Image (cartoon, rainbow, N blue to C red):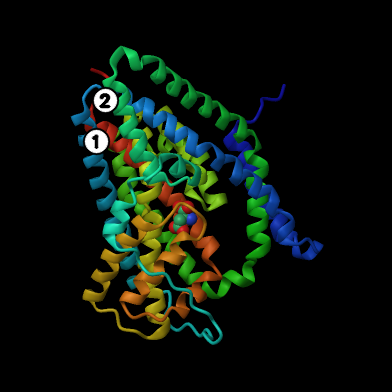
Amino acid sequence: MSKKLGLPAQMGIGMLLGVVVGAMAPSMSLDASWFKPLGDIFITLVRMVVVPLVFCTLIAGAAAVCDVRKLGRVATKTLLYYILTTAAAVTIGLIIANLMNPGEGLNISLEGLKPKSKDAPPLLKVLMDIIPLNPIEALSKGNMLQVIFFALLFGFGLSMLGEKGRPAYQFFDACGQAMINVTAIVMKYAPIGVFGLMAFTVAKHGLNVLLPLGKLLVVMYIAAALQVLLVYLPCAKYAGHTPKSFFGGLIEPLIIAFATTSSAAALTSNMIAVQKMGAAKSVSSFSIPLGNTINMDGAAIYMGVAAIFAAQVYGIPMPIDKQLTVLLLAVLASIGSMGVPGAALVMITMVFTQVGIPLEAVALIAGVDRVMDMARTSINVLGDATGALFVTKLEGEDLNEC
Ligand code: ASP
């Protein structure tokens, strides 16, 4: 009797089949664009769940917190964890790139490449933008920081009502759980979605596109692996996880992140996974959506690696003070990145401009960005998950236990 394959295994098969079909596509005259709709449907389905899920679970989570000071403590620890692990990520990226010299001796014509640029928004504006003028607009636009801000306040307001607020609390709690069920339904499509995404990526970025910048890719993947080994696994161990239980628990969000290159698409699956792995609901319902928006360790590694790569291609010296500037800016730029494909490629222009790297370099890296983004997004998602497990362990108890 055959046993039914679990979802992660089905997604793994979808991914492998996608790679094979994508690799064969050119010889069968199949265009990459044929596979795209399969993947796009998946991304839209999973992103559809995010705003209602985050809104409802955060309201219910905040309303159930017995001691608001505890939530403040969780927020402080979470933010500290985010900043320290992101700084570690850029540092690892910079060190590995300095050791392996991905851009040295590269003979690539930069002629005709068109730079795109983005100015960093002023910090004050970023902070003020967290407050929504109209919460409904924040919801409809999916502005995650504004949704988090309003949902937390609304949850506190609800808990101040005491018994009277109970029906509303139960309503939002039930809606949150319903959205988790919606996710489970949507995820049934994941193996096909993952197949479409991988087939599209491989058909579009065949080996001939990737090879010239192969060393850059190798450096990025080594740095990403080191971030896992040196930062996440020790934190997960502290939270009581072995590498096996850590990766086993997070396999679904990881495959989604890798295939979609959008951590926003992996958000729901990540939140459900860490809760199953023991992260407190009160911590993860807040820290996963927040981390999804501001904690981007993968993007930070990438900025360190790409800055050294581009400087080497152009023969621009990168003394230690310039590398420290890259470190600082990469932390800020990764906070400003969004969980959508290619976000860090746009934000990196801010780093390049500051350290005098010509923006044409962005166009040069763009050719292989998708493959870099797969590693980035996986790390972005792992970083958030590890944070939720780590902070739960630091707190030692669930915030909802009075
Ligand atoms: N694609 C990444 C994410 O969704 C963002 C980036 O680094 O470009 O997390």
Q: Is residue 293 above or below residue 52?
A: below
Query: Which residue does the numbered mark 1 point to in the structure image?
Result: 74
Q: How many marks?
A: 2
Q: Residue 118 in the image: x percent, y percent?
A: 42, 69
Q: Is residue 297 visible?
A: yes
Q: Quadrant of the C terminus?
A: top left
Residue 318 is drawn in which quadrant? bottom left
Verify CB contact (< 8 Å) between mark 2 and mark 1: yes
Hey, which residue is sitting farthest front in the picture?
133
- Mark with earlier residue (2, 1): 1
Q: Residue 314 in the image: x percent, y percent?
A: 41, 84
Q: Amino acid at mark 1?
A: Val
Residue in the picture at 26% in, 52% down = 83
Q: Residue 2 in the image: x percent, y percent?
A: 71, 25
Q: Does ligand 1 reach within 8 Å of label 1's beta carbon?
A: no
Number of the label disc, if any, that sits on residue 258: none
Between 211 and 311, the residue placed more toward the observer is 311
Query: The residue tagged with tag 1: helix, strand or loop?
Result: helix
Query: Which residue does the numbered mark 2 point to in the structure image?
Result: 399
Residue in the picture at 46% in, 51% down = 339
Between 187 and 400, the residue placed more toward the observer is 400
Between 248 and 386, the residue placed more toward the observer is 386
Q: Is residue 131 above or below residue 54?
A: below
Residue 358 is drawn in which quadrant? bottom left
Q: Residue 273 in the image: x percent, y percent?
A: 45, 33
Q: Residues within 10 Å of mark 2 (few under 14, many from 20)?
A: many
Residue in the picture at 60% in, 31% down = 6
Q: Is residue 98 left or right of residue 250?
A: left
Q: Amino acid at mark 2?
A: Leu
Q: Is residue 300 left or right of residue 14?
A: left
Task: Determine the CA span between mark 2 and mark 1.
Answer: 9 Å
